[in-house]
Amino acid sequence: MKIKRSFLIIYLSLLTAAFIFTLSLSAYADTSSTTRLSGFDRYETASQIAKAGWPQSDYAILAYGEDYPDALTAAPLAQKYNAPILLTTSSSLPNSTKQTLVDLQVKNVIIIGGTGVIHSSIDSELQAMGITTSRIAGQDKYETAVKIAQQITTPSAIFVCTGDDYSDALSVAPIAAMKQMPIILVPRDSIPDCVDNYIAEIKVTKTYVVGYSDLIGDSVFERLPYPERIFGFDKYARNIAINKEFDSEFKSENVCVATGEGFADALTGTVYCAKISEPIILIKDNSPTDTINYYHQRLTNASNVYIFGGTGVLSDSLIKGLNSTVPTVSPTEAVNSVTTILTPTQISKLVSPSVLYIETYDSSGKAYGSGSGFVVDSNGKIVTNYHVIEGASSAKVYLANGTEYDVDKVFAFDKDRDIAILGINASGLSPVTLGDSSSVSTGDKIYTIGSPEGFENSLSDGLISSSSRTISHQKFIQITAPISSGSSGGVLLDEKGRVIGITTASIEDSQDLNFAIPINDLKGFLTQDINKNLSNLEEVPTNFADLQNYLNNNFGTLNIEGLKMNIFWVVNEDDLMIKGVDLQIHAFMDSSSYDNWLLLCDNGYQDKLTNNFKSVFDMLQTAFPDKSIWLNGIAAYSTDSDPVGFKPSEVTYDSAKGKWHVFHEFIGFYDKDGKGGAEPEFNAPN
């Protein structure tokens, strides 16, 4: 077989790079020294860690050694006082703990937890040693965490972790201590009053919520200030995701490891990690790939590996095997790895709650079309293709849980790029994670989720068959995953569940010729707000005759809470109704709509009706910035019976025909100088 010389050189270079990388890995054990900080039990291990980090300390934190809840959040407090964390039993100080207090010349001990956990006899024992004691305790682990947090001065950010396990709080502990960020514990589906009250007292700009909704539910997430989730499908994945999130804050001089299968050694080790500005890596037998990769990444420049715990929990063979294991990805991928490669089932579970189905309607409320979309902001900002909503007067979106919302506004759109960003009146939604489409490569494994032919949340897989394909001067990602009618506007995902594209089109009668818009093309639109609705996306005609047709075509039927109002629009230029007004718009309510109008008024939907008319008024002000504008809605109809609920001036009687005529202005906007109108006046029948 003939091989081109250029290819051969590249191939040999790759082999050489791989060989060097393998040699460097095998040399780690020789170039990095190993220090095991351990004792015959957890109490002595804590003492050994304390002595290694603190030759002398005025303060020490004392925690219960048999269970984790109270002590989990103590690391920031320990860092504040430059103190180690030591462990005790309920009723007496272990000899190793007592000796360490003496060796470190500790003058003050802060006990974490109430006397039901650490008995008052411990206070007496410490005081007999000449040590001053204080205690931080609440009614439960949640209040104890809050009381510890209150010792931190004006935090700008907080961590929120589950109170039902120890690993996540321990994973955030080094960075929380370094940056003096409190660690708050919560149950899955509620926020304790003590936590609510604490959050109300502080002003934070970021809340890092650790875990998916199976650990901390969406109902809790949405109530937290400026929340951002740190994901991972198990405690080891979350540990690495946390460390990667704050990688730039750590030094790279040492590696610190502890077992993830118990809390005690990692707990006392986290404060040592904070002291030397390094993360803690949780490991076990057969550690996950991400853990191995991250360990080797940090090992590259490290001079020492600190092992918290004895050989009974982290054997020498485990550490040796970890050092000698070659990462299963390239060195570059190991450095850039953030989360575990996800299975299709995991991707579906992660992303499907953020993908939605869209139905569009014409001005008469008839079904117009459908497509897919996805949530990019928890407060109701969603993305789809422009062609999904093009020409529609209204639309509804349906979330994966069946919740239905009206599309209230359009934030941004681009016909050429086939992108639209819509708004719904919602909060606490689960947004997707946006990836980087510039980093994708031909051959990458990908997934799509959308609603092909209306079948919601359908998952498909495939490959990137071309990372950059130009069609009609626009660049696309070509994929083999199928795209059918209704899946336009769905998500194109990488193997880590990040959105790298918006599924948009396929070539008819062709196999595997399907395309997605690179997600980086969307990012520039995310901060825009053109404040339009679906029915006024087109340019407003400046010719008055055309304007009247435009209004009747686009706003001839208003659909509010399922109640339709038929409107006939009349455009007059400086007519006799108000002299001197440049543009007068009259919206006459059809007599058949009167009963629906009364129902809207009776059910408190005046504001929604007002908003419909205000969107028209705002549109007119934008289209005619230099003209004074008057817009009013008028109920004008005839009836055989004497109408009630109207002013005498609004009703006339035609004796010749035996008819009563009503002329009632139910809403009015008036911009007399072209510089913005007053608040609209809504007039319901009396």
Image (spheres, rainbow, N blue to C red):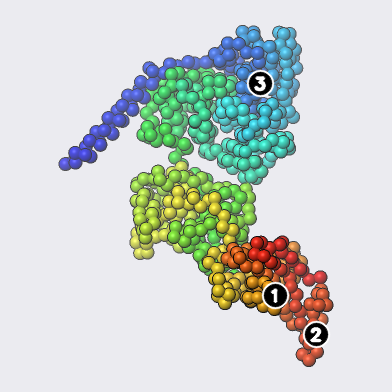
Left/right of residue 343 with respect to residue 45 in the rendered view:
left
Quarter of the C terminus within the rendering: bottom right
Residue ranking furthest to the bottom: 656
What residue sits 35% from the left and 24% below the top? 24
Q: Tell me which corner region of the image, top left, top right, bottom left or bottom right, holds residue 600.
A: bottom right
Q: How far across and down, in percent of the image, does residue 167 sit? A: 57, 30
The residue under label 2 is: 653
Q: Tell me which corner region of the image, top left, top right, bottom left or bottom right, holds residue 218.
A: top right
Circle 2/circle 1 CB separation < 8 Å = no
- Give the answer, above or below, for where 595 lies relative to 154: below
Amino acid beneath label 1: Lys
Give the label, 2 or 3, closer to the camera.
Answer: 2
Q: Secondary structure at mark 2?
A: strand
- Give the answer, above or below, for where 449 lies relative to 292: below
Q: How far across and down, in percent of the image, does residue 456 sit? A: 52, 57
Amino acid beneath label 3: Tyr
- The mark nearer the N terminus, 2 or 1, is 1
Q: How far across and down, in percent of the image, does residue 508 sit? A: 37, 64
The residue under label 1 is: 579
Residue 400 can be seen, yes or no: no
- The mark nearer the N terminus, 3 or 1, is 3
The residue under label 3 is: 64
Amino acid beneath label 2: Tyr
Q: How far across and down, in percent of the image, does residue 191 sit? A: 69, 39
Total labels drawn: 3
- The mark nearer the N terminus, 2 or 3, is 3
Closer-to-camera residue (259/512) = 512
Q: CA distance from mark 2 to mark 3?
A: 88 Å
What residue sits 37% from the left and 28% below the top? 326
Residue 108 can be seen, yes or no: yes
